[in-house]
Image (cartoon, grey):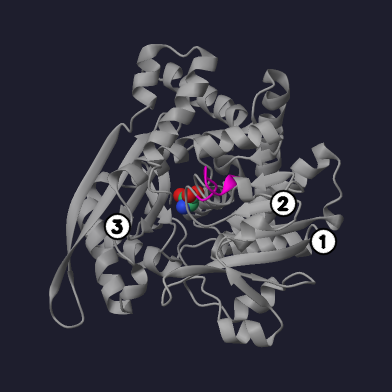
Amino acid sequence: MNVTTNAFQMAQQQFDRVADQLNLDQQVRDYLRWPMREFSFRIPVQMDNGIIKIYTGFRVQHNDAIGPCKGGIRFHLSETIDTVRALATWMTWKCAVVNIPLGGGKGGVVVDSATLTNTEKENLCRGYIQKIWREIGSRRDVPAPDVGTTPQMMGWMMDEYSKLSGEYVPGVITGKPVGNGGSLGQTEATGFGVVFAIREAMKKMKIDPGKCSASIQGFGNIAQYAAIGFTTMLKGKVMAVSYWDRDDRTSYTISHMKGIDPVFLQTITNQYGAIDKEKSKSAGYEIEEGTGWIRKDVDVLIPAAIEGQINAETVGMISNKVRIIAEGANGPTTIEADEQLKKRGVFVIPDFLCNAGGVIVSYFESVQNDMNYYCPRDEVLQRLDEKMTVAFQSVYEMFEKEKVFMRDAAYMVAINRVVKAMQLRGWI
Ligand code: GLU
């Protein structure tokens, strides 16, 4: 992330802008600008060499007016209380904009999970739950995976919580492995959700997706399924993807003249989203430096890595051909870059709408856990499509009615719903 960008300040500035436009009362703003509750704790972890290492963990609960807090846990070296606050705040808007009965929360641990062995990961996951279990729960706050965490880790966390509370509680956490309380369709959910949002945007803009090209930042879970969905469902071409190389400590862009084959690239990608350079070269792919993805002459850009990637320095690299930016990541575009995109008339599908597929299927997962009945994959994906389509429509209607930027329109829809719930509960 651009060092000058503080994600939480960015989240607050985005909120303030719209709070002004909506003429929100001061006490409502004071409540929504900050998380309602936050925790920071130390986690001792037994390492394989017998030594105990201490990690820092966070859980932030931004708002639960509409329902229990909901949001992932990131394992990331640059995690801070402010990144977690920002992400928790965005979760409140995300759940509200797609109209699911959940609030916003987020967790984090300052760690690079790639440096841990499997046992160390398990110890850290269990340690995280030991510190926070009294503050979470299926009717209180429900974590899930995010950057650096996996379904297996959610399985360990659910198990630890169940042990501590003395009963099987699958609904305490979502994104669990299938066969262990997880939902079919969860793996593809966020990436496919991005594609459903792009499809709806293209309908409004009268663009034929089959003639379109895209370039994607990242090749983690969201990017992989966005690429697969873009090529198989929309029949468009993905020209490039990028990835972070831990060994070289830099990022690379991988492209192919005829468009990449995401399913092939998946077979040569490790669990952290890094693509095998040699194998991709021998398959005819070109490897360029990290910002290559943003410079491509394509119709759609999909930032699907981390926050702050489209910023004052990189926004100028975007080609004039780009018509849509579909934000797969949380907070990928800074306030300064937003201003440039507005001037250029680029249609932005804002993060908390565009990448809501993951939390929508998380919601379906918790409903299945409550029912103790599991749905087929097609049904889950069909319901995901319906939710994303309706959410896109409601934001687009606001965009047309208020003649504002799509991000502001999404904020308007979300804030109105949260404020209404707070009023109905008699909080304000
Ligand atoms: N971490 C994902 C997000 O940022 C999913 C959250 C969830 O499923 O609770 O939307």
Q: Is residue 312 left or right of residue 205?
A: left
Residue 29 vs 253, above or below: the answer is above
- The reply to whether the residue tagged 2 has its Cβ within 8 angstroms of ligand 1 is no
Q: Which mark is residue 300?
A: 2
Which residue has dot 3 on it? 109
Q: Which amino acid type is marked by label 2?
A: Val
Inter-mark Cα distance, 1 to 2: 13 Å
Q: Residue furthest left?
A: 51
- Element under disc 1: loop
Q: Earlier in the sequence, mark 3 or mark 2?
A: 3
Q: Is residue 310 magenta?
A: yes
Dot 2, crowdedness within 10 Å: few (<14), some or many (≥20)?
Answer: many
Q: Is residue 9 left or right of residue 278?
A: left
Q: Earlier in the sequence, mark 1 or mark 2?
A: 1
Q: Residue at x 25, y 59 (%)?
A: 128
Q: Position of residue 388 (x, y in %)?
A: 66, 43
Q: Residue at x 53, y 15 (%)?
A: 22
Inter-mark Cα distance, 3 to 2: 33 Å
Question: Which quadrant is the C terminus positioned in?
Answer: top left
Residue stretch rendered in magenta on the structure: 309-315
Dot 3, crowdedness within 10 Å: few (<14), some or many (≥20)?
Answer: many
Q: Position of residue 202 (x, y in %)?
A: 79, 44
Dot 1, crowdedness within 10 Å: few (<14), some or many (≥20)?
Answer: some
Q: Earlier in the sequence, mark 3 or mark 1?
A: 3
Q: Position of residue 230 (x, y in %)?
A: 73, 59
Q: Along the line of sight, which residue is nearer the eye, 321 or 419?
A: 321
Q: Is residue 32 visible in the rendered structure shown here?
A: yes
Residue 67 vs 426, above or below: the answer is below
Q: Are marks 3 and 2 in contact (CB under 8 Å)?
A: no
Q: Which amino acid type is marked by label 3?
A: Val
Q: Which mark is residue 235?
A: 1
- Element under disc 3: strand
